[in-house]
Amino acid sequence: MRVIVTGSERGIGKAIARELCRRGHYYYGFSRCNDIDVSDYAAVRQAFEKLEDDPPEALINNAGIVEMGSVLELTPERWRRQFATNLDGVFYCTREYVRIAKDRGGKIINIASTAGLGPRPGRSAYAASKAAVINFSLSMSEELRPYGIRVYCVAPGACATDMRRKIAPDDDFENMMKPEELARLVVNLVEGGEMLDGQVIQVRGR
């Protein structure tokens, strides 16, 4: 299978890309490392145009950023920057994937967060953007069913990534869920996932 993975240069996205390769699949990495910034619609559109003659079987919307700060510390620019990547990027990639895959079906897997299911003081922009991804995913699951496109929403809990070390350096990373563990679940959805679409799949570590 061929799969698009956004944010594939580090963390969860990198682990997903490696797991796809380990199982014999091919992935297209969308990241700023190859000049595909998911917050830039023109760049996203151009990337998908190169794939429209033979659309990949799945899209994994994983790219995300977090910036700490209370409501008084967050500037409008920092607020918008998080929404631009975490939410707008999901919309842009979803729109373009549906455009090229609507005649043959496919899968979309959106990586949200348990932060989108409850309060996160000091991370309100991140939490709000992930809450929006959750609702967008559920809406798309219904909307895209006529096209044969299944939509999955994975909401991981704490995961031992560089991002997590940045925002919570005192956490117990030894006993925390590892990116590789989450990657195995995500690739299982790529390969199967029957009856798991159209809901929020919460994944928590030990």
Image (cartoon, helix red, strand yellow):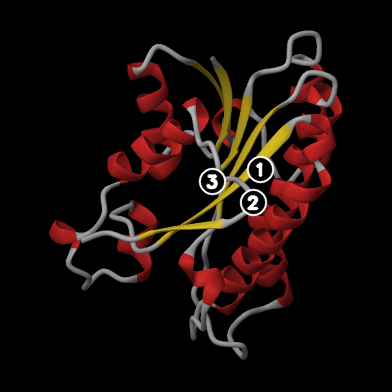
- Of labels 1 and 3, earlier in sequence is 1
The local secondary structure at tag 3 comes to loop
Instruction: For the residues labelled 2 and 1, say whether their Cβ atoms are less than 8 Å apart.
Output: yes
Which of disc 1 and disc 2 is earlier in sequence?
Answer: 1
Q: Mark 3: which amino acid?
A: Leu
Asked which quadrant contains residue 106, the reply is top right
Q: Is residue 126 visible?
A: yes
* Gap in angstroms between the C-alphas marked 1 and 3: 9 Å
- Numbered disc in front, either 2 or 1: 2
Q: Which residue is label 2 attached to?
A: 198
Estimate how packed mark 3 is, as few (under 14), some (14 to 19) or many (20 or more) residues with alpha carbons within 10 Å.
Answer: some
Between the C-alphas of marks 2 and 3, the distance is 7 Å
Of the residues tagged 1 and 3, which is closer to the observer?
A: 3
User: Which residue is labeled 3 in the image?
Assistant: 196
> Furthest residue to the top?
53
Residue 51: image x %, image y %?
Answer: 74, 15
Q: Which residue is rendered at x = 73% and y = 33% of the image?
A: 149
Residue matched to label 1: 151
In the image, what residue type sits under mark 2?
Gly
Point out residue 35 in the picture as x, y percentages from the top left corner. 65, 29
